[in-house]
Image: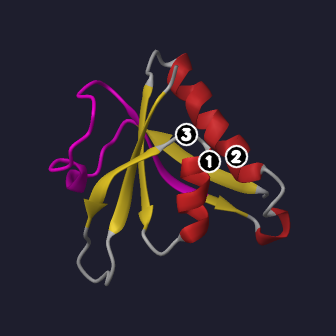
Amino acid sequence: MVGFVCINKVEPVEYTGLNWSLKEDCMVVHRMAVNPNYRRSGIGTELMKFADELALANNIRYLKTDTYSINTKMNALFKKCGYHLIGEMSFLGKEKPFYCYEKNIK
């Protein structure tokens, strides 16, 4: 396996108190991983493009996601793919916050 991504319409409860720019239906990117042997080859970017395509195929133009604040590679990928940081959330047992992102698909 080269990589995978989990995308659905289920928003984590922790998203409730955040200041999202839209209140409409969205798809959420929950998990993504790329085989270490294939990293830095564009697989992550392609998986994020797939998220856009899946959303559009379902008549949804709004995506949300999050990642651990110290996960510099995922934070960089989200920004590269057009996501905007909208806030932070915390999880019990995690020392640092998670960064939350959104993207409006044109």
| Disc 2 target residue | 45
| Disc 3 target residue | 82
Question: Horizontal and vertical percent for residue 9?
Answer: 37, 35
Q: Are marks 3 and 1 in contact (CB under 8 Å)?
A: yes
Three-letter amino acid code of the residue under disc 3: Gly
Above or below residue 72? Residue 45 is above
Question: Horizontal and vertical percent for residue 31?
Answer: 51, 56
Residue at (55%, 39%) from the top-left corner? 82
The residue stretch that appears in magenta: 9-32
Residue 49 occupies which quadrant of the picture? top right
Q: Residues within 10 Å of mark 1 (few under 14, many from 20)?
A: few
Instruction: Tell me the quadrant of the picture where the N terminus can be found.
Output: bottom right
Secondary structure, mark 1, is helix
Q: Residues within 10 Å of mark 2 (few under 14, many from 20)?
A: some
Residue at (53%, 60%) from the top-left corner? 75
Side (left or right) of 94 relative to 92: right
